[in-house]
Amino acid sequence: LIIIMVAYLGIFQGPVRGILLAATLGYLADTLSGGTTGLFTFLRIVTFFLTKLACENLYLKSALSQTILIIMLSIIDGILLLSTLYVFSSVENLWIFVVRFLPIQAILNGIFGPLIFLILNKTDLLLDPR
């Protein structure tokens, strides 16, 4: 869910507000996970920048393009997470997670992403009527 929210921030919010909210979401995940401090903050900031980069080069207002973006971001995020844990942690057999769970997570994020984008758009319109 957090990856979808950060992708939404990258597509629909400005850079300053988006990066602050993405870092806040990452810090919240760091706090609640009890793991390495700063890991999820770093990953959410990277996800935000990747989304902004994709937004400059691609049209990301359609549901199909959002689905593809979220699937790709989920895969990249999972690989970055596991690579970082592999380097800084003594946990073994992390790559089993990539093979078993990451594809399912990426596909589910892609399926539910446009629906959550729609809900976030409606919420954003209610909070900021222009």
Image (cartoon, rainbow, N blue to C red):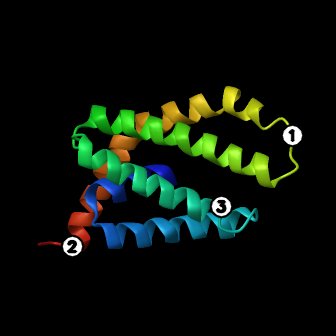
Name the foreground residue: 68 vs 118.
Answer: 68
Which residue is identified by label 3? 39
**Label 3 – label 2 distance at C-alpha:** 31 Å
Residue at 57%, 36% (x, y): give it: 105
Above or below, comparing residue 64 to residue 15 in the picture: above
The secondary structure type at the circle numbered 2 is loop
Q: Which residue is mark 1?
A: 92
Mark 1 Cα-neighbour bin, 10 Å: few <14, some 14–19, many ≥20: few
Determine contact: label 2, label 1, CB under 8 Å.
no
2 vs 1, front mark: 1
Label 2 CA crowd tier, 10 Å (few <14, some 14–19, many 20+)? few
Residue 53 lies, in percent from the top left, at 34, 50
Measured Cα–Cα span from mark 1 to mark 3? 18 Å
Left or right: 61 as drawn, with respect to 67 = left
The residue at which mark 2 appears reads as: 128
Name the side, left or right, on which 83 lies relative to 128: right
Residue positioned 25% across, 40% down in the render: 58
